[in-house]
Amino acid sequence: MEKDKIIYVSDPMCGWCFGFGKVMGDFYSAYKDTYEFDVVSGGMVVGDREGPIGDFAEYILGAYKKVEEYSGMQYGQPYLDQLKTKTLWSSSIKPAIAIETFKQFNPEEVVGFSHAVQIAYFVDGKDLRDEEVYKELIKPYGINEAEFIEKLNSEEMRKQTNDWFQTTANWGVTGYPMVILVRNNKYYAIAKGFTDLETLKKNAASVIEQN
């Protein structure tokens, strides 16, 4: 029997998704044998939005404590220091392609990898355009480095990632994180924005019971 599917719609540049990462990881750990899991990126920072973070850094510096308070996740000092320079590069493209590429090698672990990408940014303040970041992140998974980097830079992965940007827009996703449960080819949102673990579990159970 085909498993129901959980689609986690996230974005590497989304601070609330970083905050939601532990919840999603715990949900995956609890239900990885029940559901098939996928992570797709929404493309929050693309096109004209890409570039040095600039004055938007001031907004984040005023708002990040709220994410910490709600989620229990802590932003790293390297990231906060980078924000203050207003030069930290902001773009969803490369990290979203990296997540899509990872799925070609180890789709079962993509929930954890996608959160590791966000930790590299929001804790360690890494420039996610740098391939060295991904070489480090794939080490725990035993993925061949040269093969990963080749695929990361392929037109195939860029197109696949852009297709997901368009698909999530067509779904009407305008904010992240969002978690969708797919059952009998129907799509049910079980999280819109930051959601605690117990609520996420209850929402999933409710969909299963009613459908």
Image (cartoon, grey):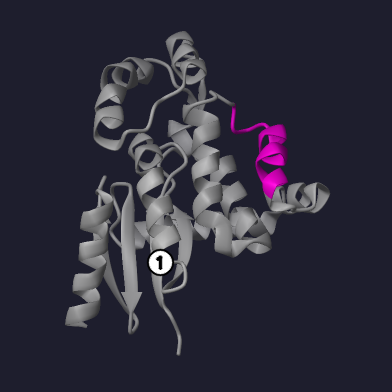
Spot the residue most to the bottom.
1
Q: Give the image location of residue 119, x and y in percent.
A: 50, 34
Report if residue 116 lies within the magenta region: no
User: At 70% from the left edge and 37% from the top edge, which residue is drawn?
Assistant: 136
User: At 38% from the left edge and 18% from the top edge, which residue is drawn?
Assistant: 57
Q: Looking at the image, can residue 93 be seen?
A: no
Q: Is residue 173 above or below residue 70?
A: below
Q: Give the image location of residue 146, x and y in percent.
A: 82, 48
Q: Is residue 80 above or below residue 193?
A: above
Report if residue 132 lies within the magenta region: yes
User: At 48% from the left edge and 9% from the top edge, which residue is drawn?
Assistant: 85
Horizontal side of residue 137 vs 35, given as left or right: right
Q: Quadrant of the C terminus?
A: bottom left
Label 1: which residue? 31
Q: Which range of residues does the magenta coloring cover? A: 127-140
Q: Give the image location of residue 110, x and y in percent.
A: 54, 56
| Residue 201 position by quadrant | bottom left
Q: Is residue 103 above or below residue 186?
A: above
Horizontal side of residue 6 vs 133, given as left or right: left
84 or 23: nearer the viewer: 23
The amino acid beneath tag 1 is Tyr
| Residue 86 position by quadrant | top left
Q: Give the image location of residue 84, x and y in percent.
A: 43, 10
User: At 53% from the left edge and 23% from the top edge, which residue is drawn?
Assistant: 125
Q: Looking at the image, can residue 80 be seen?
A: yes
